[in-house]
Amino acid sequence: MLTLLCASVIIFLALEVVPGDPASVMLGVNAQPETVAALKQELGLNVSKPKRYFNWVSGMLAGDFGVSYTYRTPVRDMIADRMVISFPLALYALLLSTLIAFPAGIIAATRRGAVADVSVMGTTQLGIAIPNFWFAMILVSIFAIKLRWFSAGGFPGWEAGFLAGLKALTLPAIALALPQASILARVMRSSLLDTLGEDFIRTARAKGLTAGQALWHHALRNALIPVLTIIGLQFSFLLAGAIIVENVFFLPGLGRLIFQGITQRDLIVVESVVMLLVFAVVMVTFLVDIAYAAVDPRLRRRM
Amino acid sequence: MFRRFSALLLGLAITAGTVQAAQTDITIGMQLEPPNLDPTAGAAAAIDEVVYANVFEGLTRFASDGSVKPALAESWEISDDGLTYTFTLQSGVTFHDGSTFNAEDVKFSLDRSRAENSTNAQKQLFDGIESIEVPDLQTVVINLSAPNGALLFNLAWGDAIVMSPDTFDKAKTEPVGTGPFKFSRWVQGDRIELEKNPEYWGASAKLEKVTFKFISEPTAAFAALMAGDVDAFPVYPAPENLAQFEADPRFSVVVGSTEGETILSTNNKQAPFDNKLVRQAVAHAINRQEIIDGAMFGYGTPIGTHFAPHHPAYKDFTDNSSYDVDKAKELLKEAGFEDGFKTTLKLPPPSYARRGGEIIAAQLRQVGIEAEISNLEWAQWLEQVFRGKDFGLTIVSHTEPMDIGIYARPDYYFQYDNADFQKLISDLTLETDEEKRNIMFQEAQEIIAADYVNGYLFQLAKTGVANAKIEGLWENSPTQANDMTEVFWND
């Protein structure tokens, strides 16, 4: 709660010092000064800063994020419209990244130094190095322009059907998942290698378990803690950090909303979205803490 | 069994039939999303690009060649003293919500835009209107305080469209107009859909449905056209791809003119630019063709003054500021800046400014002027350059049609203050004779060219890409609009 309060003050102050005001951006270069003044009055921009901050925070507590200066629609509705794209996209990308990273990391760790390990390490190095927008453009030119399996971007809306929506998110999710999967696979590998070197694994093997059994029953579970931390961080990143990929695929997600909001000085939208993301990060961290307890019973008592 | 079979055949026949009929929906790509859909509530060109002539209409309108045509006003009469305009309205016009359009709506809309607390971005269009009367529901009388030769032109702007008093307050998100298309839906951040208005008073639209899709990233715009997600991009953001589209038989590239005079705006009140010799030196240091080729990939017409080359009153003053490095150095010497000087070059986001700025900075360096480039966002540019007047040089395209009058405003950001010019423009506003007006426009062009107020670079070209089967798109851009009334698929 304190985190959220501090965040709200920082966000508000940071955006208030940005030069430029929404009224003059909206009215352009031919507007007369009194027209700008009239619009400022209409938007409620001539209220003092502390009062505006107070209105904003108290509104948010009541679930009311205010009304966008430029669009003149409630910010809550705008965020809700964008969330139905950004949230599934982040989840989809995370799922893909986990599905790729787990087997890759396990294979690399168990066959340390072998061809499989070297190729996983090489591919993941490449995956981290490739910028995701570039990878996204390559995906578009192959699958949308050449093969025409997917459209180059855009989102038909979930009302067009679940599969149509999923299809539209597939290329962006792959583009987002690749670097994440690479990082995750490497973390998985090194964490698993550490665990496999521990005494209790040797004990397990001494009890007569095969290498595979020891891995599945003992090592994997213990190696999961750092992996979960990374997954938590990645989800927050995917939710907010998809701005560039959203632009490449012209998806109307949260990232683009922030971007549009900043260029139009639609401060209330930017403030509210950023605040929401802070809230999401706090929530995810909390969920990751719960997940720690699920994989490591010792942590349950400490909570 | 047989019945089912024939039903199947019938089904096949129906699908085959629809395949053969010409396509009646179209998807238009745009780089920027409009902030709202009320053309009287904002300067964003994207608003007009969606609703002008499609959803909303005014008394008069622009045709694609830039001429002013009747729209909701069927005809008009101007009194001999030029002070009274009597408009006769079209009959049988209804708004999209079914209500009848009449003269009261016109009076309401214009009065609202010129009111004290109006937030109309182009309020100056209504300057000089003294009163508006409605003698009967088919007639509107506009009384002026002084003759205004530009009134019919001013009323054609998107900022002067007519709305109903019952629906104007919802126009930002659910516009209700009189045009050939009705607003149907807006998925914010993604697209706006319009559908044909079957009740339209004029020649009805050929398309059933128009979708405007917002794609800000130039590479994504390219991909969307190539993949067929978008049928046309009337203002295509990446001139570097145009050659590729030209070579592809599936597409046609449409190059037209715009009202955008792209200029190296100069702060006439800031030293050393308050010295005419320095401004003249800058003008001669600029190689326009190099900028057009380098920044715009060859698209654009050189200009020597602030006027659109396609207008009948245009005069070519490019020789007045021809590229001549030696002369520029001489002029600087004469002005006392033999060793050159330092200044700022503040660039807004469009590629003409960012790319053009790099080239201009290099050209200025050749005559000894160090222009320090800083890249600004639009909001910063408006704050620092436009309002704060804190700049030496900047590059911007002035896209409003017939806007030479800005040089008569001494507080305008480039701060040109010339009493003779101001007198000329106020005389010009009072003049209603077309021929005399054109002569005065030419005088005005000459004065600012001879004073080297700004560096005049080029007229922005409108470069669009469309599926080769689409016909009827506007080639030129007399106002920033996508009139879809005449557009159809020629299969």
Image: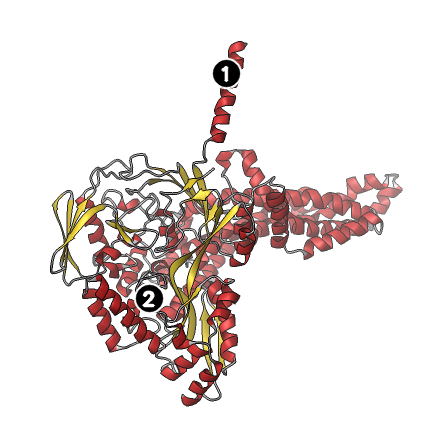
Picture residue at 70% right of the left edge, 44% below the top:
A100
Q: Nearer the viewer, mark 1 or mark 2?
A: 2
Quarter assignment of residue B206:
top left
Question: Is residue A67 in sight in this rendering?
Answer: no
B475 vs B443, left or right, is: right
Front residue of A177/B352: it is B352
B425 vs A11, left or right, is: left
Amino acid type, residue under disc 2 in the picture: Tyr
Helix, strand or loop under label 2: loop
Question: Is residue A182 in sight in this rendering?
Answer: yes
Picture residue at 25% right of the left edge, 50% below the top:
B60
Q: Which residue is mark 2?
A: B314
Q: Are marks 1 and 2 on the same chain?
A: yes
- C-alpha span from label 1 to label 2: 66 Å
In the rendering, at what x and y percent does residue A125 appear?
A: 73, 55
> How is the protein colored in the picture?
secondary structure
Q: Which residue is mark 1?
A: B7
Disc sitting over residue B109 in the figure:
none
In the rendering, at what x and y percent does residue A65 appear?
A: 41, 49
Amino acid type, residue under disc 1 in the picture: Ala
A126 w.r.t. B485: above or below = below
Front residue of B444/B180: it is B444
Give the total number of marks visible in the rendering.
2
Mark 2 Cα-neighbour bin, 10 Å: few <14, some 14–19, many ≥20: some
In the rendering, at what x and y percent does residue B137 appear?
A: 14, 42
Quadrant of the drawing holding the N terminus of chain B? top right
In the rendering, at what x and y percent does residue B250 appear?
A: 53, 45
Q: Read off the chain for label 2.
A: B
B310 w.r.t. A292: above or below = below
Q: Read off the chain for label 1.
A: B
